[in-house]
Amino acid sequence: MSWCGWGDPAKARELPEQVRGLLRDLLGVRAPHAPAATLESVRLPPVALTPAHLAALAGVVGAEHVRTGHEERVRHTRGKSTPDLLRLRAGDGSDAPDAVVLPGSHEEVAELLALCSRERVAVVPFGGGTSVVGGLAAARAGFAGVVALDLARLDRLRSVDAESMTAGFEPGVRAPDAERLLAAHGLTLGHFPQSFEYATLGGFAAARSSGQASAGYGRFDDMVVGLTLATPSGTLDLGRAPKSAAGPDLRQLVLGSEGAFGVITALRLRVRRAPAERAYEGWRFPSWRAGSAAVRALAQEGPVPTVLRLSDETETMIGLAEPDAIGAGGSGCLLVAGHEGASVAARRAAAGAVLARLGGEPLGEGPGRAWEHGRFSAPYLRDALLAAGATVETLETAGFWANLPRLYDAVRLALLGALGSPLVMCHISHVYETGASLYFTVVTPQNEDPVAQWERAKAEVNAAVVAAGGTISHHHGVGRDHRAAYAAEIGPLGAGVLRAVKARLDPAGILNPGVLVPED
């Protein structure tokens, strides 16, 4: 994975001249003020951990699994948000961990947490490194150092229960590997977020991930039926049955905890039969309002496609739903529907009847296939835009159907007010009977301090989301970027509950300090 961008450097993309012209003429984008730093020139703080600390860590996992080299530290610095990448491209590695430690078992994780708790060493659990909300930048104040706890060695499929339709995994398994391992049994998770190529199963659980096929397969937290959590205070083994009335479900306390309460070391996940058929298609609606009504009808009345996504007029015009043909979009609002499994033709026809009745124009399989082919390409496009001098970032929220228009307008107005005349695009990407998520992409020219430029805009959007009654995140998580807004969302009592849980599981506060849990 690129150290200052997304994914495989061999897949890096050049912007078509049509897109360069659009950026220049429509937005006034110009080349960045300074060239990007090289990996070797990234400025890192000195390693704060003492030789005794490093020796103790090596005593748990072996010296070869404690790494303090320049490249290892850079590659474990922050996540993949636009501010994260801009800082690294500017040579700023000030949030780098002092050491990268790779445990090989639950027992080693537990022993490392006990050691770090005694020595007041902060621990940042690290999976695929794909956080886009500041979830991998620990607060250093008051700690002897910071360790990135890389779970890459915990990468096994432990069990498959074909009768119960569950599979047991270690947390460091990357999503493509999970699909490959399950395919040998004729199974799938069906979880395909945009981070699919690099993210891990443990990261999906820790951030309550939601994939592009969530309408058909559910969110990742819907798939988790059991898990093991190592904490400085001991181990939690959760999930004796699919559902239970034995008090509050503590699995839900761990899901979305972003490494602040403990380290997930095992997962038991619901699986599905691998689909026998797939069909993706496109529809055009005359307006965002008409398209939204059609999406709501499918979500509430059925049949619900496996994938259901509606782009607004601007996103359709730019062609963002088809990243391989960016700049060649059309008019109206593009809806992409994907059908997987059995009886695809019948379900597709039934959904098509609803869409046609509500004003949709069928476009055939072409737009659907284009979306499917480019579904993981957008982050590569962001890298090219950053290199060209544009700040491009995504943000998301969710709300009830009745409040969705207000939420949509609030976010757009906040971005326009903070950035002047940016390009703001949106799509509905995850639907429920009662509401949906809104996923925004914004493009604006970089000024002399693009990180500060975006942070001001992000603060305005966070405030607008809270004021408009939306949630601060549908699937990206809280991290550091959303922590203040999350506190406003759950209120003082809710924040106090989280602090109490943190104090019980992590008394020394070493786990991902500064992330998720609101300040007192």
Image (tube, rainbow, N blue to C red):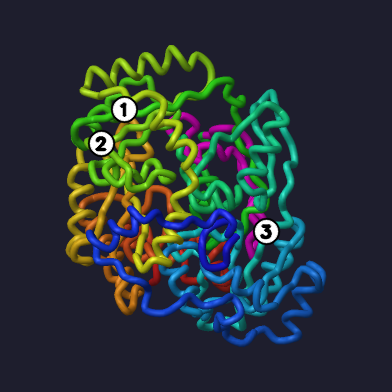
What's drawn in magenta, residue-wise?
215-244
Residue at the (55%, 63%) spot, across then down = 504
Q: Are marks 3 and 1 in contact (CB under 8 Å)?
A: no
Viewport quadrant of the C terminus? bottom left
Image location (x, y in percent) of residue 58: 79, 73
Q: Is residue 273 left or right of residue 34?
A: right
Residue position marked by numbered label 3 in the rendering: 151
The three-letter code of the residue at mark 2 reads Cys
> Which of the 4 image quarters holds residue 146?
bottom right
Q: Earlier in the sequence, mark 2 or mark 3?
A: 3
The mark found on residue 333 in the picture is 2
Mark 1: secondary structure: strand
Viewport quadrant of the N terminus? bottom right
Residue at the (56%, 71%) spot, across then down = 77
The residue mark sitting in front, 3 or 1, is: 1
Q: Earlier in the sequence, mark 3 or mark 1?
A: 3
